[in-house]
Image: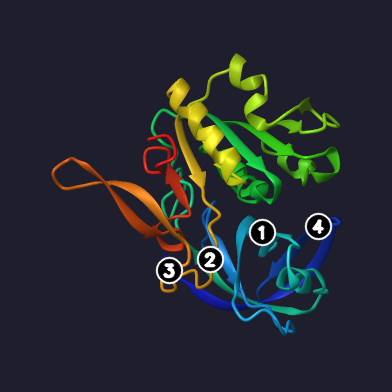
Amino acid sequence: MKKYCLDLTVRSTEHLHARYVLLKLAYERPLPPMCPGQFVEVRVDGSPTTFLRRPISINFVDYERNELWLLVATVGDGTRQLARLKAGDKLNCMLPLGHGFASYSDIAPVKPEGATRFLLVGGGVGVAPLLYQGAKLTQPGNDADVTFLLGARTASDLLLLDEFEKYGRVLVTTEDGSAGERGFVTDHSVLKGESFDMVQCCGPTPMMKAVVRYAWQVGVECQVSLENMMACGLGACLCCVEKILQREADGSEAVHNVCVCKEGPVFSKEQVTWER
């Protein structure tokens, strides 16, 4: 898929929470094709301590409004600078980067053969790529049955629930029990009472490891979107390397070091080494 370096215009900056901001960006020409699970590298201007671009998941693309959404967690000076952007400001973005959820080719959405029931599991800012994935899965011609399972520490940390509800059933867990079921996402009763054809997940590594463990136990297909530290987004700097299982020409499996930004960020449960 072709990559672009574009100066996007900020349409709005929505402060969803003390730590999270939603940037809605537009371009003067039609936005290029982007797949769920891909990400952008944004240049942070005006920060004396931020020298590298910041990788941010594609939260949503509204082609009717020619609008790209980025959900940003403000964890350092660079992301705090992004949260200060105002309508009319410019934000330089390289996009789209990486390979997204395998439900889609680079050109057109294609559901995995026979898959109709999808469970999309997210925690924290890891919920970001699941919104666009849910929208694609439920568009005419796909008509998948989508369940979102979203986890957070407390009710105020749950993000964009109204948007998720447009595309499927929304279930939540909170560690303190202030919303939904108490506990982690893998404690939710839906995992014991229902079955799915595909689980797709993004969030903290311990959460994704638990979801992969569940997927192996029940024998369901599963993909995870890794959130390794990335600097270049193009596979040049080698700071996001992960050990991934790959099948050799003779049919055997071997562990290889791959750049998550280039070969991922989405991998299948068979590729990650957590439960192997």
Question: Could you tell which of marks 4 and 3 lies nearer the N-terminus?
Answer: 4
The N terminus: image quadrant:
bottom left
Which SS class for mark 2?
A: loop
| Badge 3 vs badge 1, beta-carbon distance below 8 Å | no
Question: Could you tell which of marks 3 and 2 lies nearer the N-terminus?
Answer: 2
Which SS class for mark 3?
A: loop
Q: Amino acid at mark 3?
A: Leu
Q: Nearer the viewer, residue 100 or 158?
A: 158
| Badge 3 vs badge 2, beta-carbon distance below 8 Å | no
| Badge 1 vs badge 2, beta-carbon distance below 8 Å | no
Question: Could you tell which of marks 1 and 4 lies nearer the N-terminus?
Answer: 4
The answer for how far apart the CA atoms under marks 3 and 1 are is: 37 Å
Which SS class for mark 1?
A: loop
Residue for badge 1: 64
The answer for how far apart the CA atoms under marks 1 and 2 are is: 31 Å
- In the picture as drawn, the residue positioned furthest to the top comes out as 193
Residue for badge 4: 19
Callout in the foreground (4, 3): 3
Checking the image for residue 238, the label placed there is 3
Residue for badge 2: 230
Q: Is residue 267 visible?
A: yes
